Image (spheres, rainbow, N blue to C red):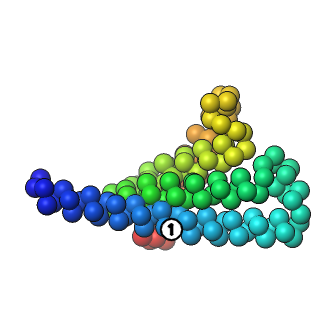
Amino acid sequence: MTAARRRDLWRRLRSAAFNGSFTGCLLATVYSAFVIAVTLLNGSTVVDKHGVSLTTVVVTYYVAGTLGGAIVGALNSFARSGVSPVLLGIPAGLISFFCIGTATEGPFWTWDRSVWEGVAIMGVILGAAAGAVWRRFGVR
């Protein structure tokens, strides 16, 4: 592989990762607006009953959206057909549920086995499901 081709590949990879992060931030904004609206309409008890603050929830959405979006964006070129989108949804799901776990359970080094299992199971199942929806409706 020539140096020019490598530079072009890295440029496209960075661009795709940036676009993925941007999309993740847009989704985080939608989710944040929803949770803020629910909190304003129903009071803070909706968020408080889960033991987290509204700020923690919003920050978690943006961290998960930025990281998950960057990974999905960077790997998007590999997910053009077959089961690839389903497999690509798994890392995004794992990142999202890792961030949710951190928001609700505290730092990951304090987690017990059940939290890790919940993150793994939910991340794989819902990440794969999101990838399947992505594939089915041709989201690119």
Question: What residue lies at 10% left-to-right and 55% top-to-bottom?
Answer: 2
Q: Give the secondary structure at mark 1.
A: helix
- x and y, in percent, of residue 71 in the image: 43, 54
Instruction: From the top left corner, tell me how far across and down residue 81 is, in percent.
Output: 35, 62
Picture residue at 61% right of the left edge, 64% below the top: 28
**Residue receiving disc 1:** 23
Is 112 on the left-hand or right-hand side of 88? right
Quadrant housing residue 29: bottom right
Q: Is residue 113 above or below residue 20?
A: above
Mark 1 crowdedness (10 Å alpha carbons): few <14, some 14-19, many ≥20: some
- Name the image quarter holding residue 110: top right
Against 104, residue 13 (above or below) is below
Regarding residue 16, the answer to whether it shows in the image is yes
Q: Amino acid at mark 1?
A: Thr
Residue name at image x 20 percent, y 59 percent: 7
In this rendering, the count of numbered labels is 1
Residue sitting at the far left: 2
Where is residue 49 drawn, in percent x and y?
A: 86, 50
Q: Could you tell me which quadrant the C terminus lies in?
A: bottom left
